[in-house]
Image (cartoon, rainbow, N blue to C red):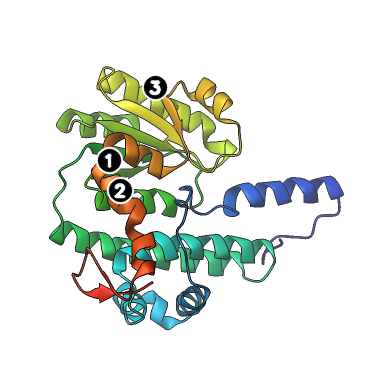
């Protein structure tokens, strides 16, 4: 669990503390829990991880093309394989198999892939569902989960905006110009708890109670405690629950996407319109 530039600890208590910090900050790079029944094929994932580690991974379009060549839809690559790759990176770092620098570079390449698919969605899909604001609290080391969540919501027909550690004036300007049906505050570590609670208070004030506020993420505390500290309306740990509540038709499509594509020879990508397999 040591990285270049981090001296070895002489005290066992410090080692235990640092291990806990590493597990909290990097053990769960993606804060959205995957939907039940999603199957990520190991051979596809191994290729994806290998591409991320080499020059091909620096070009989001080339990375996506390589996976689409395996008959995987762009949205499946972005939502499912990127999430699983992020977890694998976190596990590899904890096992001293990759450096923190490598994790950072490959995580940024995952971000680039998500942005590329997101651009494709904007040009091919129209949002007809609820509007959602996704906020990431301060002190987050990685924000990939929020962008994967935004992509999943857009695929289900939501209109989605993401902001990373916004200040009060930025939020005020955003909410003055837009009305959001729901807001989701993502907190990935204990260090971001105060920031997350502050975001909930600001949202409550600016929306005058018209926006339903959810809080969630990979923060390792009990839901009851999280709700008590943040005073949000509800704790959200599973995106499928949100889809079922606010966009049942879109949720059914999102939840069945991988299951159906694995049951037949070819599945149609909602982004490209081409046939693809899982």
The mark found on residue 48 in the picture is: none
- Mark 3 neighbour class, 10 Å CA radius: few under 14, some 14 to 19, many 20 or more: some
> Number of labelled discs?
3
Q: Is residue 61 above or below residue 211?
A: below
Q: Which residue is mark 2?
A: 252
Left or right of 163 on screen, residue 216: right
Distance between the alpha carbons at the discs numbered 1 and 2: 6 Å
Residue tagged 3: 201
Rounded to the nearest angstrom, the CA distance separating label 1 from label 3 is 29 Å
Q: Say which residue appears at 47% left-offset and 67% top-offset.
A: 40
Which of labels 3 and 2 is toward the front? 2
What element does badge 2 sit on?
helix
Specify the quadrant of the image occupied by residue 176. Answer: top left
- Residue 80 lies, in percent from the top left, at 42, 61
- Disc 1 on helix, strand or loop? helix
Of callouts 1 and 3, the N-terminal one: 3
Q: Mark 1 vs mark 3: give the one in front.
A: 1
Could you tell which of marks 3 and 2 lies nearer the N-terminus? Answer: 3
Asked if the residues shown at circle 1 and circle 2 are in contact, with their CB atoms under 8 angstroms apart, the answer is yes
What is the distance, in whole Å, between disc 3 and disc 2 at their CAs?
33 Å
In the rendered image, which residue does mark 1 sit on?
Answer: 248
């Amino acid at each position: 669990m040591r990285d270049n530039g981090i001296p070895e600890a002489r005290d066992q208590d410090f080692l235990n503390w640092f291990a806990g910090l590493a597990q909290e900050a990097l053990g769960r790079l993606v804060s959205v829990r995957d939907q039940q029944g999603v199957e990520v094929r190991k051979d596809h994932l191994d290729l994806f991880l290998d591409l991320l580690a080499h020059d091909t991974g620096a070009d989001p379009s080339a990375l996506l093309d390589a996976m689409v060549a395996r008959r995987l839809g762009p949205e499946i690559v972005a939502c499912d394989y990127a999430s699983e790759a992020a977890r694998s990176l976190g596990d590899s770092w904890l096992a001293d198999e990759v450096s923190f620098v490598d994790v950072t570079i490959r995580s940024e390449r995952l971000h680039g892939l998500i942005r590329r698919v997101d651009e494709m969605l904007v040009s091919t899909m129209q949002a007809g569902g609820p509007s959602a604001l996704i906020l990431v609290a301060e002190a987050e080391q990685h924000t990939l989960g929020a962008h994967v969540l935004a992509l999943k919501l857009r695929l289900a027909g939501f209109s989605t905006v993401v902001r990373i550690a916004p200040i009060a004036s930025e939020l005020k300007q955003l909410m003055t110009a837009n009305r959001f049906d729901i807001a989701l505050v993502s907190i990935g570590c204990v260090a971001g708890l105060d920031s997350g609670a502050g975001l909930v208070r600001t949202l409550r004030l600016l929306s005058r109670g018209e926006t339903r506020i959810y809080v969630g993420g990979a923060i390792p505390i009990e839901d009851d405690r999280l709700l008590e500290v943040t005073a949000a309306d509800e704790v959200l740990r599973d995106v499928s629950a949100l889809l079922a509540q606010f966009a049942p038709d879109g949720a059914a499509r999102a939840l069945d996407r991988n299951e159906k594509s694995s049951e037949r020879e070819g599945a149609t990508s909602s982004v490209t319109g081409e046939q693809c397999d899982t």
